[in-house]
Image (cartoon, rainbow, N blue to C red):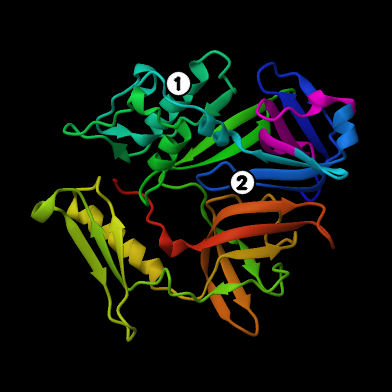
Amino acid sequence: MTTPDRILTQHALTGEWLSTALPLTDVEYGDELNGPGSLSGKLEPRLLAQNPMLLNPGTTCIYVESAGQLRWGGLVWDARSQDNTLTIEAAGWSSYLQKRHDLDGNYGGRGPYTNTDRCTVIRDIWAYAQSVMDGNLGVVVDATTSTSTIGTLAEPHKSLPWELPVLGDVIDDLVSGDATPDYTCATAWNAAMTAPVRRIRLGWPRLGARRTDLSFASGENIIDPPEVELAADEYAQVVIANGGGDGSAKRRSISAVRNGRLRLEHVLDLADITGTDILATRAAAERAWRQTLGTVAEITIRNTPAAPFGAWQVGDDVYTRVHNAWTSYTGWCRVVSWTIKPQATGGPQAVISLRPSSSYQYGGVS
């Protein structure tokens, strides 16, 4: 996974291959937890002028193939020229739903939903989007099930056509909590190696795993001293979880510690939750990461046996050790996104965004 063998482009509706070796330079691509991920690169404008069908933003799929495997896929959204450079911007499959709305209500009559698995609703949204003429992107959504539900008898989850909800925003809301499913975009060749499989991977209670076989470490594979965040803007050792209800009947749970620091508070708005036990769990999880200063948000690594490119994925917890003149940090960190730079100066690099694993509450009911 160190260098892209090929960049390929394809018509999103017809499946026609437009290019099987697009000469992009400065390529960067990667995946994202609960988001589409992205790709960027540069092309000489004359190449597009000679064949304008190579790239048609909004209807062209673009792929990265390395070592015979498709490592990334998505839709080209932007191509603009300046001087002798054409810059390409693309995003993964879920970005398509940011351009789609519920015109019929309840995702074509599939709802409303009462105590329904959020994974089911996500699949229904994709099924609705791809059932409309010229709307079938060919995305397959995992059959994963969860115990995280949405809608109640008193307040079913509805999608109202006159509000024209953005389908991508609805899915973002469905995966936004601590005890909700995860998703990421994925692409691979089919068994015959003739056509791409465009996929939404769903994970419950999480995507990824605790990887005891990998590590990120200074002097081993981390190549630049990472920035360590010592900021109190997000700090709090008191978290107030506000749940459902009105006025004096509103549910509330407070998680607090005294640690010799000035008291700082954070309010967690969870209006859809009425269970006090769930509110307490969410408040405790929020406080666990908010009272930690000195976290590492991003690292740049080389391809080494400690964490080979392609061995980790979004959602994985990897033990991280950062030691430099400013800090000494060790702990489990979750990979929330990654970007491969195969043509970086000095050799391929991966930029990995991290978040302390303690900031996530896996499982439970939201």
The local secondary structure at tag 1 comes to helix
The answer to whether 180 is drawn above or below residue 156 in the figure is below
Local crowd size for mark 2, using a 10 Å CA cut-off: few (<14), some (14–19), many (≥20): many
Q: Amino acid at mark 2?
A: Asp
The answer to whether 236 is drawn above or below residue 301 in the figure is below
The local secondary structure at tag 2 comes to loop
Instruction: Examine the residues drawn in magenta and state their main secondary structure.
Output: strand
* Highlighted range, magenta: 50-79
- What residue is shown at x 51% (from left), y 62% (from top)? 355
Of mark 2 and mark 1, the one earlier in the sequence is 2
Q: Position of residue 114 (x, y in %)?
A: 24, 30
Q: Amino acid at mark 1?
A: Tyr
Question: Does residue 190 appear anywhere in the picture?
Answer: no
Labelled disc at residue 31: 2
Labelled disc at residue 128: 1
Q: Position of residue 60 (x, y in %)?
A: 70, 27
Labelled disc at residue 329: none
Question: Does residue 87 appear anywhere in the picture?
Answer: yes
Q: Report the front residue among 324 and 268.
A: 268
- What residue is shown at x 44% (from left), y 38% (from top)? 169
Asked if the stretch drawn in magenta spans residue 53, the answer is yes
